[in-house]
Structure formats: structure tokens, C-alpha cells
Amino acid sequence: MSGSGFGKLFKITTWGESHGKAIGVVIDGCPSGLSLCEEDIQIFLDRRKPGQNEFTTLRNEDDKVEILSGIFEGKTTGTPISLIVYNKDHHSTDYGNIASCYRPGHADFTYDSKYGFRDYRGGGRSSGRETIGRVAAGAVAIKILKELGITFTSYVSSIGELLIDFDNFSEQEIKTNPFYMPDAECAKKAEEYLKSIMSDSDSVGSSIECIIKGVPAGIGEPAFDKLDALLSQAVMSIGAVKAVEIGDGISVATARGSENNDSFYVNNGKVDKKTNHSGGILGGISDGSDIFLRASIKPTPSIFKEQETVTNDLNDTVLSIKGRHDPIIGPRAVVVVESMCAITILDLMLQNMGTKLENIKKIYN
């Protein structure tokens, strides 16, 4: 299987399956000298692990990470970092009834079409557990970026038809409710709403927003490796994401140029913008203002309602999916979106170091 790697200088390769022995990631290109321990990574993995509350899957995994290589005396050595998380609570028997048929909304049919074979136990490589490797690598990238003054604020901005009210926005609130929403009132409504969804044996979609502060102007490569293009690729590569917006996103289609353009002005001797419709990116290159990204997350496709499908020997059938599944993906995916954004930005910042002769002189003179 190709396509399991992402990045050029800070490159990650994820590996493993949902019901295999373990899952993990290899990070190549991490600079030496970064203080790093397993707890630095575990904090991020705990944000996506199952069983956090009644609105997540009951799969009982502690998702404890182990560092296998790349660290000596508490610091990165510059060599590849290998991280592993062992699977412990996989119930493969829950998937026996789908071995010969295709689950609607899943990758069963497409994997079978591509490989002539699929791991039906939880989806194998297409499972959401693949994101463990992404989050582990993202934790490393975020720690590096934090030393450069770059920070991330990520949260769920909508669940079904419920939208947060930015007048109630509180960054502190994000970590206090099970939905990672910055609006306490909306989170309370979401709790009752999701209970009704669950009682109907169904699931619902959501959206995630990520605000990235401190990225300097000039990050991103023109043409095919634009910052917004690579951020979109990185986030869209997350299995549940169906759309990515930067800045005003799809609303630009109904805007006028006079409304969408961000006016420049001089602020304390530096170029600044009066608005940020661009979401911090112009011409595929960061402009120094906050980067704003929104990802649309589909409803969990594993639902307990009966659904029409077909078997792999082309017979119509009806399927009711068993097992332990989230009624909503968004809350556990917040840290995944954040991680993929961090990996993308760090990789492009490392590439940017060689774009000016003066930068090269600073390093080698």
C-alpha cells in the first residue's frame, strides 16, 4: 500500500490496523535537541482515545504510547522516531456478520475493488484508529512549533444543526465539556440532542475549526505546495472529513471583491490587515495573521439501524451493524485535525529555511 506517508522534510509514515497487534508512526526529519518524553505525546492521545464519556465508543483502550527510537537522554537525536500503541480491546467477533457484505458509508467496497481483499475487522487500515499515528506525530510537531511561538486553538463548532454562538466563545470552556465546544450553552443543548440521536440508533455530523496563531508571513510554496493546498490535503486525508474551508470558505462564492478583500495598513511599523477573510493565507503563502481552517465531518457510518447493501457475491441484503461505535466523530477528531495542521506547517517552515540566502548564511556562517 502506497500513500501512507506525508511531508517532505518533517515526514510521517503511519502503520497498523484497527484489530492488529499494534498501531503507530515513524517520524523522519525531527530536529535533534528537542526535549521529548512519552507523556508529551500521551496528553494528545488522551484527547482522541475511546471511552471518554457516554458519547464515544465503549472500546476500552488506554492508547498508551511507547517510544521505540530516536530519543536519547530525554532529547531527540535527529534520527527517525518510532512510536507504538498496542491494541488491547479489539472484539473481532463483532464484525463477523459483515465479512461477506459491504457496510454503507465505509471503505469496504472500495478496498475490495482496489486490492481484491479487505480486513473487515473494524475496517483495518481505513479505521479511525489509524489516526493514532497522526496524533502522536502531531504532538511532536506542536511541541516544536510552540518553541517558535505558534499555538493552536481547535474545537467543535457545530453538531448537526446546532451552531456555537461566538458571543459565548470561551477557550477555557473547550476542555470542560465532552464535545470540545467553546460555547457552554451550545454544549448543553448538544448533550440532549445527541441522546435523542442515540435513542434513534443513528449518528450525526459535525464541524471542527482550528485557529493557528503566530505563523510568520512567508510560509508556503507557490503553485502545487501552497499552504492552503497542503493544509486541505492533510485534513482531507482524515477518513471522516468531507470538506475543508480556509478563511471565509464557501461563503466567498456569494461575496463581492470589495467585501472579500482584506485592506492592509501599517501597525507598529509592520504590515497588518483590517480584516481576515483570507484566513491568514494569500497566494498560498501565510500573511502573518491568524490561520483559520474549518473541517466538515460526516456522521459515523456505523449505525445500528437496518441498511440496504449487497454481498460480495452480488446479492441484495439488509445489514444491522453490531459493535461499539461513536454517535458522533467530531469531538475525538478535534486533536486529529490540529495534528495534521501542525505537521503541515512545521514541514513547510523547515522547507522555508532555504528560500533566502541570508537564512543560509545565518546557519553556516
Image: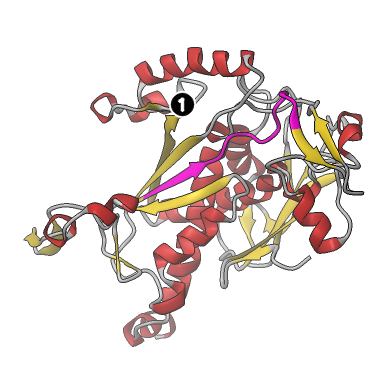
Q: State the image coordinates of residue 16 (x, y, percent, origin top left).
A: 80, 51
* Quarter of the N terminus within the rendering: bottom right
- Looking at the rendered structure, the kind of residue marked 1 is Lys
Q: Residue at x 85, y 32 (%)?
A: 90
Give the residue number, with chain letter if any, for mark 1. 175
* Quarter of the C terminus within the rendering: bottom left
- Can residue 284 be seen by looking at this rendering? yes
Q: State the image coordinates of residue 152 (x, y, percent, origin top left).
A: 40, 45
Indicate left or right for 322 with 228 as reference. Answer: right
Q: Magenta part mainly helix, strand or loop?
A: loop
Res. 6 image quadrant: bottom right
295 within the magenta span: yes
Magenta residues, start to end: 293-307
Indicate left or right for 93 with 269 as reference. Answer: right
Q: State the image coordinates of residue 102 (x, y, percent, origin top left).
A: 80, 43
Look at the picture and state if 312 lies above or below 286: above
Residue farthest toward the front in the current orientation of the protein: 316
In the depicted view, which residue is nearer to us: 17 or 28? Answer: 17
- Can residue 54 be seen by looking at this rendering? no
Residue density around tag 1, few if under 14, some if 14–19, many if 20 or more, within 10 Å: few
Look at the picture and state if 126 lies above or below 50: below
Q: State the image coordinates of residue 139 (x, y, percent, origin top left).
A: 56, 48
Look at the picture and state if 330 lies above or below 324: below
How many numbered tags mark residues here? 1
Q: Residue at x 45, y 38 (%)?
A: 207
In the depicted view, which residue is nearer to us: 7 or 235? Answer: 235
Q: Residue at x 68, y 23 (%)?
A: 51
Q: Residue at x 49, y 25 (%)?
A: 179
Look at the picture and state if 281 lies above or below 283: above
Q: Secondary structure at mark 1?
A: helix
Indicate left or right for 231 with 315 as reference. Answer: left
